[in-house]
Image (cartoon, rainbow, N blue to C red):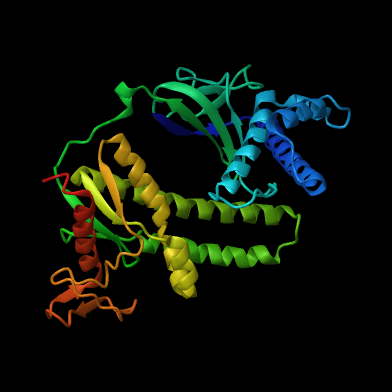
């Protein structure tokens, strides 16, 4: 099993300059060969293979105009080219959109595929071009397994991080939580983040702290729009706004990690609806679309699934178009005219009073057991 460990980096001024060169050169290589592939396709209907463009990259490094590429680790440049071909593969398999040119103001990162290590006694990492004294890091937890690669990144606020990808042997790959032999159906929402079929409710994000940060962010953005472009004060304000963005992101991510772990501690099998979030955003009006985006349901499901895999638990999905909210969990009647703003409804067939979200969670559990069988009797 592969697992990544993320640490904060503290490079000195000399190392920051070299890191910026790595960010810039990898971005240049990606954009240069993306433009070259587009030009080749427009002229001949085909574009170069990886091996052909890798040879072109070597020639580029030794040309007079681009000899500054030699200052960068060669494998990092090759990895940038591989990332371009991976982006094309995802486009052709309809997993993502067509590759676009990278911008300096977007997230900066580069990957080191080999010859990287962590010295836990000195709290430093060693990667090619940084082998003399290494880059300091906050080694707050031990990594496991064999290091396969490192990805160095820089956030919009100017913080540096390293993500260490490790291959963990089977003996260490599963940190098993105790078995509970319980199954649960969950319904994701906005007012309450999760409503469970056993009537337990998990509230949404801590709104007060996030709303306070949003107000501060809105105020700073007004000042930012009035600053002169290219000025130092504008750059200082940009970093302040970026730090608020990161703070909001970290609050949400911390909550999602804690919530996912709490669910997996209590249940062995979790049934959840396979939501088509893209359609929900397109069909909803502006305010609802913004609220749905704020909930980070995709991020939560990703965290829940990989933690379930680590702990030998199961996440099972039911169909996107299953009418979980409109179906009466008592008699099976479907209320087709149920509106989104109706948070409770009475079944016309059996007169049962339903809370919309709780009723949906029961139906998700029943449908999951019907499809997959009850794995936790």
Q: Is residue 35 left or right of residue 192?
A: right
Q: Residue at x 11, y 79 (%)?
A: 350
Q: Is residue 65 left or right of residue 371?
A: right
The answer to which of 299 and 22 lies nearer the viewer is 299
- Quadrant of the drawing holding the N terminus: top left
Seen in the picture, residue 28 relative to 130 is either above or below; the reply is below
Q: Residue at x 38, y 63 (%)?
A: 208
Q: Residue at x 10, y 46 (%)?
A: 377
Seen in the picture, residue 2 relative to 335 is either above or below; the reply is above
The answer to which of 254 and 269 lies nearer the viewer is 269
The answer to which of 268 and 321 lies nearer the viewer is 321
Tell me if residue 39 can be seen. yes
Seen in the picture, residue 24 relative to 170 is either above or below; the reply is below
Q: Residue at x 17, y 79 (%)?
A: 347
Q: Position of residue 331 (x, y in %)?
A: 13, 72
Q: Residue furthest front?
A: 45
Tell me if residue 212 can be seen. no
Q: Position of residue 8 (x, y in %)?
A: 50, 35
Count of labels in the image: 0
Q: Position of residue 45 (x, y in %)?
A: 76, 46
Q: Position of residue 75 (x, y in %)?
A: 66, 25
Q: Is residue 202 left or right of residue 53?
A: left
């Amino acid at each position: 099993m592969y697992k990544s460990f993320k640490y904060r980096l503290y490079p000195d001024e000399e190392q920051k300059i070299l890191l910026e060169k790595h960010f810039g050169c990898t971005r240049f290589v990606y954009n240069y060969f993306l433009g070259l592939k587009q030009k080749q396709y427009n002229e001949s209907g085909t574009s170069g293979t990886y091996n052909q463009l890798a040879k072109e990259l070597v020639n580029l490094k030794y040309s007079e105009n681009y000899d500054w590429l030699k200052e960068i680790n060669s494998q990092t440049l090759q990895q940038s080219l591989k990332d371009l071909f991976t982006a094309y593969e995802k486009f052709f398999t309809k997993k993502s959109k067509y590759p676009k040119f990278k911008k300096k103001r977007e997230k900066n990162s580069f990957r080191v595929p080999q010859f990287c290590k962590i010295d836990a006694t000195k709290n430093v990492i060693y990667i090619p071009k940084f082998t003399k004294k290494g880059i300091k890091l906050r080694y707050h937890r031990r990594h496991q397994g064999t290091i396969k690669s490192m990805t160095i990144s820089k956030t919009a606020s100017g913080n540096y991080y390293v993500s260490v990808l490790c291959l963990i042997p089977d003996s260490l790959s599963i940190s098993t939580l105790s078995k509970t032999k319980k199954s649960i159906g969950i319904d994701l929402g906005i007012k309450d983040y999760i409503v469970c079929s056993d009537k337990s409710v998990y509230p949404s994000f801590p709104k007060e702290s996030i709303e306070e940060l949003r107000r501060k962010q809105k105020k700073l953005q007004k000042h930012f729009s009035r600053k002169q472009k290219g000025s130092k004060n504008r750059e200082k304000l940009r970093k302040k706004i970026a730090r608020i963005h990161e703070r909001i992101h970290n609050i949400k991510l911390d909550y999602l990690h804690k919530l996912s772990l709490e669910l997996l501690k209590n249940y062995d099998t979790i049934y959840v609806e396979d939501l088509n979030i893209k359609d929900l955003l397109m069909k909803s009006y502006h305010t609802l679309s913004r609220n749905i985006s704020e909930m980070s349901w995709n991020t939560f499901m990703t965290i829940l699934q990989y933690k379930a895999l680590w702990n030998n638990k199961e996440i099972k999905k039911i169909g996107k178009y299953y009418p979980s909210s409109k179906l009466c969990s008592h008699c099976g009647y479907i209320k087709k005219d149920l509106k989104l703003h109706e948070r409770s409804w009475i079944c016309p067939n059996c007169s049962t009073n339903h809370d919309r979200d709780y009723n949906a969670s029961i139906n998700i559990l029943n449908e999951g057991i019907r499809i997959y069988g009850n794995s936790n009797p």
